[in-house]
Amino acid sequence: MKKTFVGAAFAAAFGLAACGGDMPASHVSTGVPGADSFTYTATGPGGTSSPGTVSATVNPDSAALSATLSASSWSAVAGGTSDPPIVVTAAGGTGSYTYSWTLVSGQANVAVSDASSASVTWSWNGFSRVGDKFATWRCQVFDSAGHSVIAGTVTVDIDFS
């Protein structure tokens, strides 16, 4: 049996509908969540088919990746008390999150407890144990799709006075 190729393209409410061969298809515009549909008929050597309908529902894009810090400063008194850990809260985006803490400015010997953690504290790993030791650290959060956002910066003060 000889097959006849039939093709057509026409607009659906939120995109383009097309058919070619024996399968109708639809391309829905991005950023337009909700339901869309189109009706089609096929015409070939045997006549025109009964109408068929193709329906699709587009789910909205996931929420944009965002992240916040529990505080913008952290301090410790050497040999004494320290503030609670800084906690990063991430939301939106795709999948799981990874964290990257980097030193922005200040003394390089002000060390973060775990540069890839969502919950961190700092310590001093230098020789001088006199005066205040300051640094500013920044946390960048990544989702599994490779998107990133800066959660914010933390000013760190370790007091040796």
Image: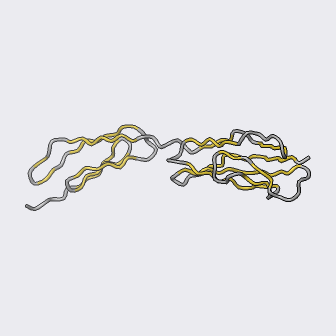
Q: How is the image coloured?
A: secondary structure
Q: Position of residue 23 (x, y in %)?
A: 23, 52
- The image position of residue 114, as x and y in percent, is 67, 52
Q: Against 58, is 123 above or below?
A: below
> Camera-side residue: 11 or 31?
31
Residue 10 at x, y percent in the picture: 30, 48
- Residue 4: percent from left, percent from top: 15, 59
Count the marks: 0
Camera-nearest residue between 145 and 16: 145
Residue at left offset 72%, top offset 52%:
112
Left or right of residue 72, residue 25 in this image: left
The quadrant where residue 7 appears: bottom left
Q: Is residue 138 above or below residue 33?
A: below
> Residue at 77% across / 51% down in the picture?
123
Quarter that holds the N terminus:
bottom left
Residue most extreme to the bottom: 2
Q: Residue at x 91, y 52 (%)?
A: 130
Q: Which of the two residues, 107 or 14, is positioned nearer the viewer here?
A: 107
